[in-house]
Amino acid sequence: MTKPVTAIGIMMLAEEGKLALRDPVDLYLPEFHDLKVATTTGPDAARLSIPNHAITIRDLLTHTAGIQDYPGPPGIQNYAQTMNVPLDEVVKALAKQPLLFQPGTQWSYSSPGIEILGRIIEVCSGEKYVDYITEHVLRPLGMKDSFFFPPPDKVDRIAMVYAHKDGKLVRSPASILGGDPAKHRQGAVFPAPGWGLYSTAEDLLHLYCMMLNDGVYEGHRYLSPFSVHVMTEPQTTGIQPVGWMRGSDYGLAWEVVTDPLGELAGHTVGSYGHGGAFGTQGWIDPTNNLISIMLIQSSDGGAESMTNVFLNMAESSVEK
């Protein structure tokens, strides 16, 4: 559920005039200047071609850039578990991989694509990614229990990540995102702009209330109404398949329900939200002024049926 938070940071910088969503990524990160595209089918599968256009910040936000998801590039393939490679080095390694497809032609979910956005935040703001998000988003919104690297006084409040084995819950292995969940990322340097945020339902409520209220929370404006609109309107219309469920489209780092098929998952048309790797979900329904947050820590997909029940119950509780 961290990706929209990183996207909010990008939108803040756009409002300050420090970047534009249509800018090519190599304008800020020169290592992406000579990207190539992999031809993935037929006798030319090993051949590389030239992108029809340079990948843009918008391409990264909509998961249409063609950036490969995990595992990572050779030499740092386990960085999402060890978290021992700095963000700038991860991004430089990502720039050496060919794109999966021509930018803007397909949709492929990519946490590394959001990591690139985290690095753009650093370059454009002059601050470390964690510092920028903390000082411009988390702290002003009063998200007092949200962080990337757990401080010692918060560790005993962190929920363990579990998997199912022989009908019982067991602690998830070190192969999951973030490594051994019992070590709480001790010694980590990689902030994981695509998935690394620890948070609570109360803190997320502050963030989602800001989005629901067109960028304002407790009298302070964080985003303009236009930025909220751009983030939550369909950006990938015409590309199929898109998103995690039928009946949805993608905005800027938010999945947006656009069709009655999406309502079967418990969201009215126009709702937008995001899930997390361990089963968490957070959705905003502007039509019914409803926010739904479900937090669970299951690394093997065991939360899906529970999530569907919860989201449907939340929407059905609203009186028209």
Image: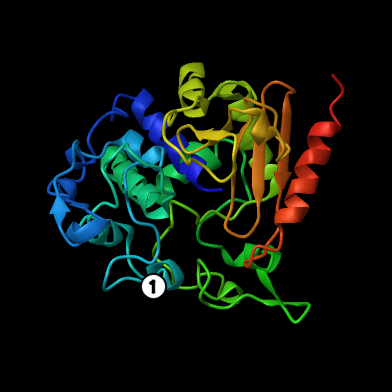
Instruction: Residue at 55%, 76% (x, y): give it.
Output: 180
The answer to whether residue 30 is above or below residue 72 is above
Residue 97 seen in this snapshot = no
Hey, which quadrant is residue 173 in on the image? Answer: bottom right
User: In the image, is 161 to the left or to the right of 150?
Assistant: right
The image shows residue 219 at horizontal and vertical percentages of 62, 21
Residue 19 seen in this snapshot = yes
- Nearer to us in this view, 110 or 171: 110
Q: How is the image coloured?
A: rainbow
| Residue at which label 1 appears | 78
Q: Amino acid at mark 1?
A: Asn
Instruction: Residue at 42%, 53% (x, y): give it.
Output: 111
Q: Residue furthest front?
A: 43
Sort mark 1 into few (<14), some (14-19) or many (20+) by Cα contacts within 10 Å: some
The image shows residue 89 at horizontal and vertical percentages of 26, 62
The answer to whether residue 173 is above or below residue 301 is below
Tag 1, which secondary structure? loop
User: In the image, is 92 to the left or to the right of 285?
Assistant: left
- Nearer to us in this view, 155 or 176: 176
Instruction: Residue at 24%, 57% (x, y): give it.
Output: 42
- Nearer to us in this view, 104 or 111: 104
The image shows residue 288 at horizontal and vertical percentages of 75, 23
Total residue callouts: 1
The answer to whether residue 119 is above or below residue 223 is below
User: In the image, is 271 to the left or to the right of 197?
Assistant: right
The image shows residue 9 at horizontal and vertical percentages of 43, 37
